[in-house]
Image: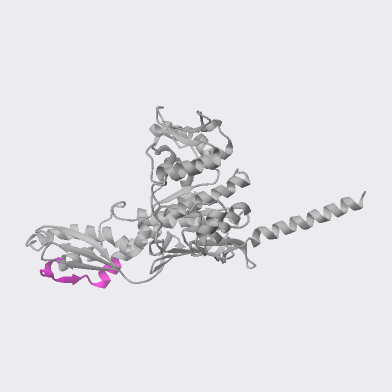
């Protein structure tokens, strides 16, 4: 049995939205992140841009926390903390002035905006200002996290905060009677940061101001970003097969060049951030089994008739394909096995509850039956608490996901048994967000929200229209051939 069957309740789902305006090929697109978020549409319509923007926004919340970015508090904030410490009495509570907290939070948000812009530059290898859609002067993002809404826009200095709408976090100092003599702790209650201090500080109160300010700064991102800031984002780029095959050689070439840094002009091309992080994921992979290893092993057997393993007996752990009682290096396996290997390795060794996994074109190089099986794998991740974002061109994958939505309706268990699915093979309609990227009449691309219902699943209109065109063309060709006989 799988080692974890925990299904995240509704109130533990990630509450995040992202609106993009004049970003690359995207004229205007809005995305609401759900346990399963699917981007469909033609090539070059902005699906990958949207996926990378989501990645940049998520990673920025994680990187902007003070324990990852050393930054002193604003002077006004530090003085407000010191005054609160000196005026608070035992069993009392003192709230910092709103303007001091808002000034510190604004600094935090400006840091977030700059970090998001750096993430985009790292992933797309150009400054955020160069990603503005042709003919426009600025790109804009609106990031929603819980009750907070943050608007960002490019200017001459990069990406900055244009507007901030939402409740301002509060910071309060308390001195409970039962607190230890010199003990200090902090926590988040609703939108407020609470600093609880010992009751016998005496002359130490002024000296504690810096420590208290550091603790408040550590907690402020949590009060503003909520659980979004606690989510790890894992990105599996398109073209994974080539990266998996060559990642050791790429890493070795960069390591060999490292001693010459600063001594000569660099000659190695820059790697997109998503590719570099994916290589890092592979290099740091350990043979330690994660909480989804049993799910991974079951799905591996069904999809590739074997298992993806890390051979730790070698100087550098090598990815191996085990089947029919033998093992071969992944370089000797089929493209389908190589394409699926990162997903299986992530499940078996890397997956953590509440991850956000962004996977581009999970159906690449796969037979239609395995495209259906990939849908089952994605659903299994959702059932285990991982938020999944995919881009896809596969009607087989989308239709199978639609079936899983329909299996989640009334009498689900009976349907699952009838069609030989397990109790974990289902989706609720409100767990799925589908965006269709299409050309706008006014130029650029937009993202249309596709309604998902428990009864009808995910509409297939986009792929059906192409099938109808092909069918009509087939009839014309057949008629022409028949008339020429």
Q: How is the image coloured?
A: one colour
**Residue 294 part of the magenta segment:** no
So how many labels did they put on this image?
0
- Residue 334 on image: x %, y %: 58, 35
Along the viewing direction, whichever of 53 and 175 lies nearer the viewer? 175
Along the viewing direction, whichever of 48 and 340 lies nearer the viewer? 340
Q: Is residue 83 above or below residue 54?
A: below
Q: Can residue 126 be seen by looking at this rendering?
A: no
- Residue 410 on image: x %, y %: 52, 65
Q: Can residue 385 be seen by looking at this rendering?
A: yes
Residue 148 placement, left or right of 220: right
Q: Is residue 317 above or below residue 37?
A: above
- Residue 11 on image: x %, y %: 38, 64
- Residue 177 on image: x %, y %: 10, 66
Residue 98 placement, left or right of 458: left
- Name the residue located 73 percent from the left edge and 59 percent from the top edge: 468
Identity of the residue furthest to the right in this view? 485
- Name the residue located 92 percent from the left edge and 50 percent from the top edge: 484
- Name the residue located 55 percent from the left edge and 66 percent from the top edge: 453
* Magenta region: 85-103
Residue 303 lies in quadrant:
top right
């Amino acid at each position: 049995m799988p080692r974890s069957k925990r299904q995240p309740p509704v109130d533990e789902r990630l509450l995040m939205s992202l609106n993009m305006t004049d970003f690359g090929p995207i004229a205007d697109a809005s995305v609401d992140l759900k346990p399963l978020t699917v981007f469909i549409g033609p090539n070059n319509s902005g699906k990958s841009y949207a996926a990378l923007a989501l990645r940049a926004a998520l990673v920025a919340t994680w990187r902007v926390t003070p324990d990852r970015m050393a930054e002193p508090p604003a002077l006004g904030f530090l003085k407000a903390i010191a005054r609160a410490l000196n005026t608070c009495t035992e069993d009392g509570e003192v709230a910092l002035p709103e303007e001091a907290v808002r000034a510190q939070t604004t600094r935090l948000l400006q840091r977030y905006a700059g970090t998001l812009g750096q993430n985009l530059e790292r992933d797309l290898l150009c400054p955020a200002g160069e990603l503005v859609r042709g003919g426009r002067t600025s790109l804009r993002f609106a990031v929603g996290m819980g009750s907070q809404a943050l608007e960002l826009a490019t200017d001459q200095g990069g990406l900055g905060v244009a507007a901030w709408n939402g409740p301002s976090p509060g910071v309060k100092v308390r001195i409970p009677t039962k607190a230890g003599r010199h003990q200090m702790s902090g926590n988040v209650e609703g939108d407020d940061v609470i600093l609880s201090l010992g009751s016998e500080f005496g002359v130490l109160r002024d000296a504690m101001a810096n420590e208290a300010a550091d603790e408040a700064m550590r907690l402020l991102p949590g009060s503003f970003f909520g659980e979004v800031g606690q989510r790890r984002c894992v990105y599996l780029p398109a073209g994974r097969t080539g990266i998996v095959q060559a990642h050791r050689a790429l890493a070795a070439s960069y390591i060999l060049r490292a001693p010459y840094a600063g001594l000569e002009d660099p000659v190695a091309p820059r790697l997109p951030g998503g590719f570099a992080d994916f290589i890092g994921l592979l290099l740091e992979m350990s043979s330690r089994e994660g909480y989804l290893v049993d799910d991974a092993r079951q799905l591996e057997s069904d999809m590739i008739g074997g298992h993806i393993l890390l051979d730790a007996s070698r100087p550098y752990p090598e990815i191996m394909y085990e089947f029919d009682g033998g093992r071969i290096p992944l370089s000797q396996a089929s493209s389908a096995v190589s394409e699926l290997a990162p997903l299986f390795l992530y499940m078996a060794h890397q997956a953590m509850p509440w991850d956000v996994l962004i996977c581009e074109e999970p159906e690449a190089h796969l037979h239609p039956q395995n495209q259906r099986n990939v849908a089952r794998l994605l659903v299994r991740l959702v059932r285990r608490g991982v938020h999944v974002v995919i881009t896809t061109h596969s009607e087989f994958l989308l239709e199978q996901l639609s079936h899983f939505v329909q299996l989640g309706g009334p009498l689900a268990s009976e349907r699952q048994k009838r069609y030989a699915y397990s109790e974990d093979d289902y989706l609720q309609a409100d767990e799925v967000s589908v965006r269709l990227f299409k050309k706008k009449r006014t130029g650029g691309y937009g993202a249309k929200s596709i309604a998902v219902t428990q009864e009808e699943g995910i509409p297939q209109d986009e792929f059906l229209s192409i099938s109808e065109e092909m069918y009509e063309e087939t009839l014309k060709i057949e008629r022409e051939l028949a008339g020429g006989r």
